[in-house]
Every structure is written in structure tokens, then in C-alpha cells.
Image: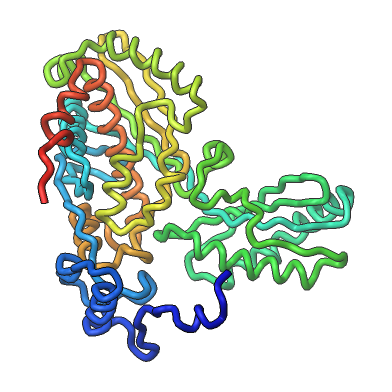
Amino acid sequence: MITSEQVRERARIPRDKENDYTDAMAAKRREFIREETGANLSHVAQYSVDPATLPGNIENFIGIAQVPIGLAGPLRINGEHAKGDFYIPLATTEGTLVASYNRGMRLLTESGGVKTTVVEESMQRAPVFILEDALQAREFGGWVTEHLAAIREQAEATTQFGKLRNIGQFAVGPLRYLRFNYTTGDAAGQNMAGKATFAACEWIKRNYPGRLKYFLSGNIDTDKKHSYLNTLLTRGKRVVAEAVIQKSALLRLMHLDTSELFYARQVQMVGGFLAGSSNNGAHAANGLAALFIATGQDVANIAESHAAITYSQPLDNGDFYWSITLPSLIVGTCGGGTGLATQKQCLEMLGCHGQGKAKKFAEICAAVVLAGETSLAAAMLNGEWVTAHERMGRNRPATE
């Protein structure tokens, strides 16, 4: 058991209550770590970011984690919002990742490009209201429906860009789970939705004629957790990327026939079903995580954003239709880490920084995922998966 005396003696991380975001304070904390642990943070200390730009993004700043950024592309996208050839920044420490995605991008581009569509968008906060019994919970749900306009007014008064689309309701015993669904402009929107929903819930508590209490999150918004509710109902943006892969291009670049690819996809779909996977394709996490790190997205949102549904079919002329749907892609082009120096530059490389660019960026993300799917599937089928990692990313001699 820790005594109060031990708590008083605990070494405290240096902070400046007046101005904590300076080079001097970062250096003071690095020196604190050197004294406490003996670790030399000379590389962490090398950065070009002005610490004064970091409030709201980090606390107890000591330096920058330098993640290598590679370039893949061009990737031709024929979307509603993303149009043209794009060069994609991917921040990763996994050898072969950039090369693999680059190969998939070449295949898709030489087949005519990727068609992308944002089909729905919705960000949630999902409070739970606790009543005396199931009957009162049902009656409360009816009251919420009747007062939706007033609830919407309270929620939207807290935000310039957030709009309350609707409120889904789910009943469990005396509990009424309310899933507030918002559009959030060009921000990812979790904090926006939380603030708006809190204001709405406080209004409900003051104005509902019966007794009730609530928790702001009843855990069905599944913030930074995968759920099939999000797969069905959308969280963030639901985006589809689809392409017709030419038989000749697949044979020339991937050394596969489209019939071999379709057969393998059928077998792997069964495997995904057997495992209860959140993705019946290969995976979306690799490319999305690398793109998220490069562009200042909240990387923890990979937990939801990696969910995907693939659909493919051989065409009569021998070509191969392949699509991937991301039902819970959470991205933004303003707010969060998108305004930091290096992240902003990577977004600018894509023409995606600032207002009015979130749907464009979402389409690029989906197209990148499809490129990774095609390349990884081909590598597994023709025996290149292990050999590529051996050559480019794995089993290298240890170096300092």
C-alpha cells in the first residue's frame, strides 16, 4: 500500500503552469528522464515543430517520434470528390508495406483507376437513460421522438458544423439507449458529437416530466472499438472503392489469371466467415494506419475504420470486378492533428487539407485500401508474400 508520505516523495514530471509549450520545457523534461532512467533522448529532441502550436494535441511535450514516410503511386481515382492521379504518403516501420501498396496502385491505375463513392456519413454519441422499468423506458422513448425538434435545437446550438440527423433507440429492460447520429462537416467529429449530446441530454433531464438518470455513453457508440452495429448503421463515413481489373494487367503485373483470383477469394471468404472477422478480405489496417499517421488522423480510430466488406465477381470478358466497402471510416481534414506541420504537408500533398476536403480524403483512403487488397491477395497466391518480407522487411541483421 502506498502511503501519503510516499506520494509526496514521488518524482513529478516538470511542468510550467504559465507556458508549458516551449523548447525549454521540452528540454527540461528530457533532462528529467535522463536523470530518472539514464535514457538519452537526443533523437527525440530533433524536430522542426514549434511547441507553441501543440496545445490541444499533446501534454508534457518532450519531442517528436520520427516515423519514416514512404511514397506510393500514382493511384488513379475516379471519384465524386477525389479525381486524378494521387501520390500517397505512408508512414510506417514495416518493410514491404509501401512497395506492396505501390504495386496494387499500379495494377488499379493501369486497369483504368478506382471509382470511389461516399454513400453515407454519421458520427455518434450514444447515451443510456435509466428508468424504473421497461414500460417507463418505452414511454420515455416516445417522449424523445415527440420532442426531437427541441432536442436537435439544443444539440446543434453547441456546434457550427454538427447537424443531428436522427436518434436511434434501443430498449433493454429499464434502459433506453439513444444513438445520436450527426454529420460533422470536415472534422472526424467525436468531440463535437460528445459536446452536442451532453447539451441535449441535460435539456432532456431538465424537461422530461418523470424521474430518470443517464450516462453520456452507454457504450453502443463503440468509440474506438469495432462493432457490427457500426458495420450495419455506419460510423464516420461509409465509402466504397471499386475497380474492374483487366485480365491482361493482372497477368502481366501479378502473374495471376482472374479465374485463379476469384477461386482464392471464394475460399478466403469462407475463412473470414469461420473466424468471425470484421473484414472478409485481406485487411485494411496496414494502409489506413500508415496513411493516418502521415496525415494526422487519430490512429486509435483504426479499431473501427479497419472493418471492411469485399465483393467481387468475374466478368464475361475475363476481367475481374472488385469492390471494398468501409462502413466506419473515421477521418477528418481539419481539427485534431491535421494542422500539425508535417501532417498538414502530407494532407496538402493529397490536396486534402482544410474545409471541404473530408469526403475527398475518405475516397482516397478507400482507394488505397483496395490497392492493398489486390497486392496482398496476389502475393499470397503466387508465393511472394514471405519472400518479399524476407528480402525487404524481415530477418535483416540487427543494427543499432
Instruction: Name the residue nearer the viewer: 270 or 196.
Output: 270
Q: Position of residue 326 (x, y in %)?
A: 42, 38
Instruction: Name the residue nearer the viewer: 142 or 384.
Output: 384
Q: Residue at x 86, y 67 (%)?
A: 209
Instruction: Name the residue nearer the viewer: 219 or 4.
Output: 4
Quarter of the image where one finds residue 57:
bottom left
Residue with the most extreme bottom position: 18
Quadrant for the N terminus in the image: bottom right
Q: Residue at x 40, y 46 (%)?
A: 302
Tell me the colour scheme of the image: rainbow
Q: Position of residue 213 (x, y in %)?
A: 77, 64
Looking at the image, residue 267 lies above or below residue 116: above
Looking at the image, residue 341 sits to the left or right of residue 9; the answer is left
Q: Residue at x 32, y 20 (%)?
A: 321
Looking at the image, residue 80 sits to the left or right of residue 87; the answer is right
Count of numbered marks: 0
Q: Position of residue 288 (x, y in %)?
A: 32, 44
Q: Position of residue 31 (x, y in %)?
A: 23, 78
Q: Residue at x 15, y 47 (%)?
A: 70
Looking at the image, residue 266 lies above or below residue 355: above
Looking at the image, residue 349 lies above or below residue 231: below
Instruction: Name the residue nearer the viewer: 338 or 159.
Output: 338
